Amino acid sequence: MENKEQKNGHSGYKKFLFVSHESLSGDLAWHIQKEGHHVKCYIKSTTDDDVYDGILEKIPDWRTEISWADIIVFDDTGFGEIAEKLRKEGKLIVGGSVYTDKLEEDREFGQDEAKKVGMAILPQWNFTTMDDAITTLEKNPGRYVFKPSGFIGSDEKSMLFIAEEEDGKDLLEVMRHNKKAWSKRVKNFQLQKFATGVEVAVGAFFNGKDFVMPVCVNFEHKRMFPGDLGPFTGEMGTLMYYTTGGEIFKQTLEKMRDALAASKYVGYIDVNCIADRHGIHPLEFTSRFGYPTISIQMEGIQTPWGEFLYTLAKGDCTEIKTKKGFQIGVVVAVPPFPFDDQKTFSVYKDSSILFRKPSWEGVHIGDVKMLDEDLRLAGESGYALVITGSGNTVEESRKQAYNRVKNIMLQNMFYRVDIGTRWYNDSDLLRTWGYLY
């Protein structure tokens, strides 16, 4: 899918190498390719063998392309050590560091670092046995959140359980009845005091020395069904806007500047928080591109992405051009998402994604491929598309995004219909507490 500009080259032409554990950043890579740059991508996961076929040039061994690339993009955690090594060798890298990998992957370490720089962390206790945690809950009744900690994978992160009862008896019963099963899956976990408030995140790109302005304030929708019901999916959609700082940034992510600079981190970093009248409490760091965050950011960031990432890796980028107002992204999926079930997905694999009108506005690709001039489902996740919209108000951005969703034809596709609707209540509370102006 090369375009004319890419074939002929241009003054800003660069060679991008994307390196992935699994198919995550294809939408960003494709966007940069459409800007006229040459893109190659490596995906380690064998279940993603056909993802991006007919869209991107895929390679079997990324290390053989190091000398070819002008810039290497590591799109996930777990690459920090090699990213640091390549930076020392003079390569331009967008991606993690050993420190930022640990910041996300080890929840306990992330909380310790947040506390160290002066963030208002919630009371929490770390455990290695269920019996000790049950005893602690019995002696200290209250509403807590159960969270796997230490170095954990995405599957274990979904084991989070939030007590609904003020004395925590529901969590206590769940832990007692699932003690054996959970002990096999989670070796380290945390009980964190529950806080009633607004879940809000703030993220920014970091150029190795400082944050790039403006920052992105965002509101995630992690559960599968409207009304925040059902299983955790990773993410079903997000509302975001850009600002040149503000209290949410100042009380949380800005405090990490020196630590990030010391690790020479280059990339996007986000901290998810609970805000209440007592403060803004960090819950977890994401020290990489977010998904679908990065696709929604393409709706709001107007600086060309190839130019942006190249200057970011060089340490020259201090500011990006963004739209005013709000952006919304809606994840469109088919079964078995968010679960792994190859047999279920076999019903949908290779299905065509069709458009009622021939418009790609706001369409961002997930696990798909291009075959016989049709966009088709690939891999086996069921994560099909991210559809975005923007507007001066939340309602305008919702209207544009959902009108674009209606243009999609895909068998048994599903999506949340309430992305962004919490804004009206959440923004009132954040203003009342002095975090928004």
Image: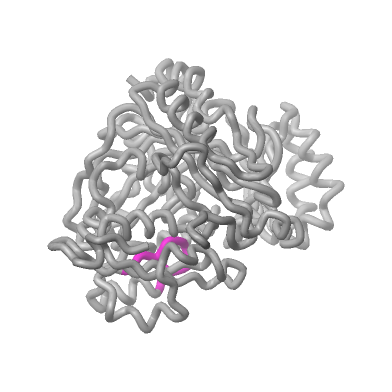
In the image, residue 6 above or below residue 87: above
> Residue 437: image x %, image y %?
32, 19
Q: Nearer the viewer, residue 136 or 319?
A: 319
Looking at the picture, tell me which residue is in the foreground, 182 or 422: 422
The magenta segment is: 72-81
Q: Residue furthest right?
A: 177
Q: Residue at x 22, y 60 (%)?
A: 5
* Residue 37 visible from this viewpoint: yes
The answer to whether residue 184 is above or below residue 401 is: below
Whole-percent x, y for residue 362 in the image:
41, 40
Image quarter (top left, top right, bottom left or bottom right) of the N terminus = bottom left
Total numbered labels placed on residues in the image: 0
Horizontal side of 126 relative to 112 (left or right) equals right
Q: Answer left or right for 45 relative to 201.
A: right
Q: Where 230 sits versus 12, above or below?
A: above
Q: Is residue 194 above or below residue 342?
A: above
Residue 60 included in the magenta stretch of the image: no
Task: Give me the residue at 50% from left, 30% from top.
Answer: 402
Rendering coords of residue 231 (x, y %)? 69, 42
Identify which residue is drawn at 51% across, 53% down.
366
